[in-house]
Image (cartoon, helix red, strand yellow):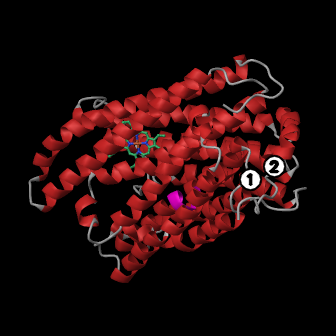
Amino acid sequence: MAGASLNVHAVAKPGDVAKESLSTLEPLVDRKVVYTFVFAALFWVVYGPWAGFFVSLKFTFPWVLSESYALSYGPLRIAHTQGVAYGWFSTGALAFAHYMVPKLCGRPLWKPGLSMAGGLLWNLGMVLGLGGVHLGYMQGLEFADFNLLSDAVLALGLILIDINLFMTIAKRREPKIYVSLWYLMAGLSWTTINYVVGNFVAALPSSTGANSAAMNGYFLHNVVGLWVTPMGVSMAYYLLPVTTRTPLYSHRLSMIGFWTIAFFYPFTGAHHYLLSPIPDWVETIAIVSSLMLIVPVWTVLANMYGTMRGRWDLLGNSVITKFLVVGAIYYLTTCFQGPTQALRALQPVVHFTDYVVGHAHLALFGVFSLWTMAAFYYMIPKLAGREIYSVGLARANFWLVFFGFLIMALMLWAAGIIQGHMLINNVDWPDTLDVNNFYWHARTFGGFLMDVGMLILVYNIIATMYWGKPSANPRAI
Ligand code: HEM
């Protein structure tokens, strides 16, 4: 099976190494567009995760930032979650999409102005949405908290980006559509629909009570499954062959993964509301679909490990490979954790505890943020025509987020399991908080390391753009 699947992602062919080095100035890629998204993502990767740090401080020192409503727990938590999901990850993934699409299509963007306008609207929507959150104008729906005006601006931005990327793909010069483009097109189209349904239809007066919960479960899990996952997997499938210089192990596996995501993900949302007034059969479908998600995960992992065969030395030498492989290990972990959490036997223990918060970070940070960081470290030197400013700083970035996240995740899972057992054994809720206190301090410490790691990412990327050593063929670190 190996090697049979190489298609337009031709950079991976050993014979094409010279071609790759000739294209280092990336003539097909519109730097202005990509940089607009990159700078915005770098802003959000400071704003979102530091908001999380202050939210976490409030657990142990409730007086922190307690004077103003704008920075109180509710708005700040939403600023954190929306900031990292739509600000950092989404803008970062869109930056990489605008780098990857012209390269895989063998032609420049159809209308760069459309993407530029889309990117500006997307970020304007973020500012309006978060401004509203801090001032108290929000919908009260998880992950759909932004006010409707900002939602309209965000959706319009996404539609403009969709049109441009789809037209570029439609007018491509490469005959085949590489798997990254399949995932990208799916993520863009599913999410435009999901965003409108989750924000506008969910705001209709008929959407109340159990209906509203079912709708929100559908929406918020599809943000993860039909946006973050396909966009992230599309990046990983691009980066893996180019960094290992080995063809993707199996195109067929990647397609099986694609269709199983498409088939099973949309039904999983109700697992957020098990044992609730949502009909039992809906919950059962959500549980079965959640279990079936192990199929697309295995396809990505089998492909990753197949492609890495004979190239494991890169794990020691290459920072980008470290981000990719560790992200892949976390992908396996999160997709084992998710389905088991969805079982009726386990959920009563972990629901409403920190275990779930640990799981959410495992997916959005451990997998997809790590892959986005890999994408930035790969793409920016090539676009800037400069070597990375500091490999040492990139390594520091990796180890800080690696250990920081490990501390955070292990503490949250431990706290969740302990608290869950205390609650089902009828311990009073306030008493469980005393036990959690130690773990929350440790989570803040882990989060601080992660935040410092991400500050280093920002500095290293900007320094590469301006002060990196000029090079006609910057090396992938
Ligand atoms: C890019 C980095 C990050 C991502 C993608 C991320 C993602 C998330 C997500 C998805 C949630 C919602 C969890 C849920 O509702 O189950 C969340 C909540 C939270 N995160 Fe983060 N996070 C990041 C960084 C951080 C950092 C560095 C900290 C610092 C300690 C942090 C602290 C928190 C806290 C305190 C909550 C709220 C938990 C609660 O209300 O019980 N996060 N984060």
Where is residue 327? Give x, y as percent: 52, 46
User: Where ligand 1 lies, by image quadrant?
Assistant: top left
Q: Is residue 454 visible?
A: no
Q: Say whether residue 396 is left or right of residue 158.
A: left
Q: Which residues are magenta?
A: 223-227
Circle 2 is placed at which residue position?
A: 13
Residue 151, which numbered label? none
The amino acid type, in three-letter code, at marker 2 is: Lys
Q: Are marks 2 and 1 in contact (CB under 8 Å)?
A: yes
Q: Nearer the viewer, residue 139 or 9?
A: 9
Q: CA distance from mark 2 to mark 1?
A: 6 Å
Circle 1 is placed at which residue position?
A: 247
State the residue at coordinates (71%, 16%). Answer: 467
Q: Is residue 327 magenta?
A: no
Where is residue 432? Give x, y as percent: 14, 48
In terms of sequence position, does the residue under pointer 2 or pointer 1 come before the other? 2
Q: Is residue 305 visible?
A: yes
| Furthest-right residue in this view | 173
- Callout 1: SS: loop
